[in-house]
Amino acid sequence: MEPAIETRGLTRTFGPVRAVDAIDLVVPARRVFGFLGPNGSGKTTTIRLLLGLLRPTAGEARLLGEPAGPGAPVVARVGALVERPAFYPYLSAAENLLVFGVTAGLAEGPLRARVPTLLARVGLADVGERGVGGFSTGMRQRLALALALLREPELLVLDEPTNGLDPAGVVEVRQLIAALAQDGITVFLSTHVLTEVEQLCTDVAVLVRGRIVAQRPTRELLGDGAGIRVRFDSPDQAATAAAALRSAGFVVRDEAPTPVAPGTLATLVVDAPPEAGSHVARLLAGRDLYPAELAPIRPTLEAAFLELTRDPDASRPPGAGARTPGTGER
């Protein structure tokens, strides 16, 4: 199946700053794809390039198998929520959707029939006739989601869709995204809420200073650093256990330094999937080694993200070759 989004060498510069630096991005169709990065990494600039709101300095992008760019016909098959869209404050939520839909070339009759369904889908059914000028930030964000769905898109690009929502609203939007994916819509999700990505996204790309530093299935990314933590009451027991595990073919990739402070457990970290914990326990028991603690290590996306986005310049003294700061683009 052709990728929903594909870029080759996509680049955008602002003066001397390369906000997006020759990225090759592949977003599988009919998936929820997480697009992550710290502030200033170039995420929003990338999204603007994909949607034709900016022209690339170099490289190319394709959406749904067609060339992307300013005025590209494929944009009609894409829904988007980028930052905070402006609405007519003196019109109701329903009227705003009608105006935007008709302006986009949708037939008014079918559109009027769809608007109540759209408002209900984003949790605004009870306030559809109220003026948008009195809406809270969260209500405006819900209306923006309805607007993104107006043309029944095949690809949905969402930039921080849960901004301003209360906890209940966050859960509802998360459920909506999952339902859209089940309907076969590709969702490209840029967010700082890593729990959303863990729960929703099948694949992830991480952008740092305009460059992609990781692009792989979420499960695979979370697998990095997984293991089994084994703790003993004494360093001698830990050393004996490490030797036994290595002789059985396990890799012990970390040990607590010795000597260990009084009262501190000596720790081994076994490079094995958490599911192998029972096997490790049986192997140790067969050698009369009984750990004080044996627990799986299940890395979080937050830990993986922090490791991938660690600033290599942070440990350098001032003026020691640190790169020029970004432009403030996300």
Image: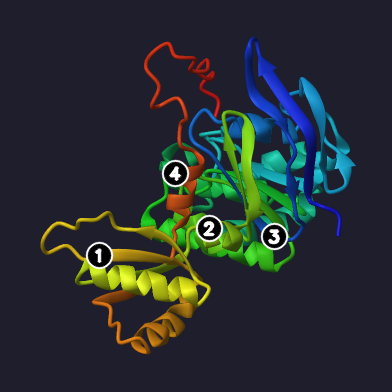
Q: Residues within 10 Å of mark 4 (few under 14, many from 20)?
A: few
Q: What is the CA distance from the residue labelled 3 to the residue labelled 2?
A: 22 Å
Q: Is residue 149 visible?
A: yes
Q: What SS does tag 1 mark?
A: strand
Q: Is residue 274 above or below residue 87?
A: below
Q: Position of residue 98 (x, y in %)?
A: 68, 45
Evaluate if marks 3 and 1 touch, with contact meaning CB atoms under 8 Å apart. no
Residue drawn 74% across and 61% down? Answer: 30
Residue under label 3: 31
At label 1, the amino acid type is Ala
At label 2, the amino acid type is Asp
Label located before the other in sequence (3 or 4): 3
Residue under label 1: 266
Q: What is the CA distance from the residue labelled 4 to the residue labelled 1?
A: 26 Å
Label located before the other in sequence (3 or 1): 3
Residue under label 4: 306
Label located before the other in sequence (3 or 2): 3
- Which residue of the protein is positioned furthest toward the left in this rendering? 262
Residue 60 occupies quadrant: top right
Task: Give left or right: position of 121 versus 240.
Answer: right
